[in-house]
Image (spheres, rainbow, N blue to C red):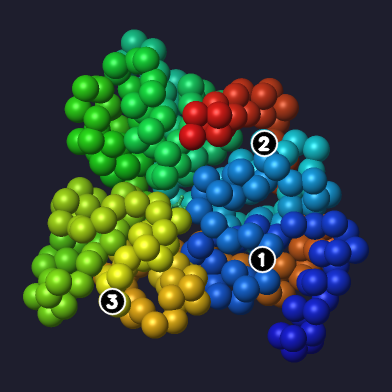
Amino acid sequence: MDELMIINEINRLKIEKRALILAHNYQIPEIQDIADYVGDSLGLSRKASETDANIIVFCGVHFMAESAKILSPNKKVILPVADAGCPMADMIDAEQLRSFKEEHNYASVVCYVNSSAEVKAESDVCVTSSNALKIIKSLESKKILFVPDQNLGNYVSKRIPEKEIIPWDGFCITHHRVRHNEIDMVRKHRGETKILVHPECNPSVVDKADFVGSTSEIIGYVKKSNDKEFIIGTEMGILHTLRKQNPHKKFYLLSPSLVCYNMKKTSLEDVYRALRDEEKEINVNKEVMVKAHRALKRMLDLS
Ligand code: 13P
Ligand code: SF4
């Protein structure tokens, strides 16, 4: 089948099976273009919790589809490529989190959504990069264990000095490898052009940026700005939406290392097969599901 036939089949099956296609901002352009909704982790979680579709085809990575299943337990949630994972989410498991809590006298646990259902189940509340500041500010506890991203943890800690935030030492292998001298180089050559980065970048990069935000916050910043050029410090998939929404603005990637290979695994054929065969369904253990739901639901209520 050629690309057009695949797209037609996806659209036909989507209506026939009352399916919803969700795609993260880092997906390849062809996937973003056939999705019913493209967004950041928070937006996608919201859509998953609100939909009345029978099937959710989640074009992203495993933890996102798992969160969709937890928020929509009666729906069939399919991840088109079973091994599209997030290396950061694998940097802590439930056992390690239990020891971390014990070591710190059972302080409150805030968990970045880039984590497994089992880790969410051991946490008090989840956050995404767009609501972490707001949610952590609103918590009563003064001492907080933040898992798994050390960079988002450090970012929040600097902005909320009244809290003692103890981050786990996980990181995003894509954002963490951007070097601060790449910012220096870009500043030298592009002068005043604004540099917008994701808080998953390491502190030496975040500290030198003009704006720090989640993927949707970066998209929102560009939309409002009168500038004509921007340097983008997050995964390259976001360039598609930015260029589509702002045809008269120019975008440059801060670093060639900003590619998440897991986010690039899903193709149109995979989405077609997912809708046709309804395989690769996401399932979560019932007990884990109940506890993880509490942490995710609390996030949605607080954001
Ligand atoms: P957001 O889209 O929430 O900014 O998350 C980025 C990310 O790394 C998702 O894996
Ligand atoms: Fe995980 Fe980083 Fe890829 Fe996001 S960009 S899915 S945090 S590895």
- Looking at the picture, which amino acid does disc 2 mark? Ile
Dot 3, crowdedness within 10 Å: few (<14), some or many (≥20)? some
Q: Is residue 33 above or below residue 200?
A: below
Question: Disc 3 vs disc 1: which is toward the camera?
Answer: 3
Q: Is residue 168 above or below residue 216?
A: above
Residue 200: mark: none
Q: Label 3 to label 2, Cα distance in Å?
A: 40 Å
Query: Marks 1 and 3: in contact by CB < 8 Å?
Result: no
Q: Position of residue 194 (x, y in %)?
A: 22, 67
Taking depth in this image into account, of 245 and 291 the one nearest to the observer is 245
- Looking at the picture, which amino acid does disc 3 mark? Glu
Taking depth in this image into account, of 99 and 261 the one nearest to the observer is 261
Dot 1, crowdedness within 10 Å: few (<14), some or many (≥20)? some
- Quarter-wise, where is residue 185 in the image? bottom left
Which residue is identified by label 2? 70
Which residue is identified by label 3? 229
Q: Is residue 64 left or right of residue 233?
A: right
Taking depth in this image into account, of 172 and 220 the one nearest to the observer is 220
Dot 2, crowdedness within 10 Å: few (<14), some or many (≥20)? many
Which residue is identified by label 1? 35
Residue at (11% x, 68% y) in the render:
184
Taking depth in this image into account, of 67 and 115 the one nearest to the observer is 67
Q: Is residue 252 left or right of residue 90?
A: left
In the rendered structure, which disc, 3 or 2, sits on the residue that comes first in sequence? 2
In the rendered structure, which disc, 2 or 1, sits on the residue that comes first in sequence? 1
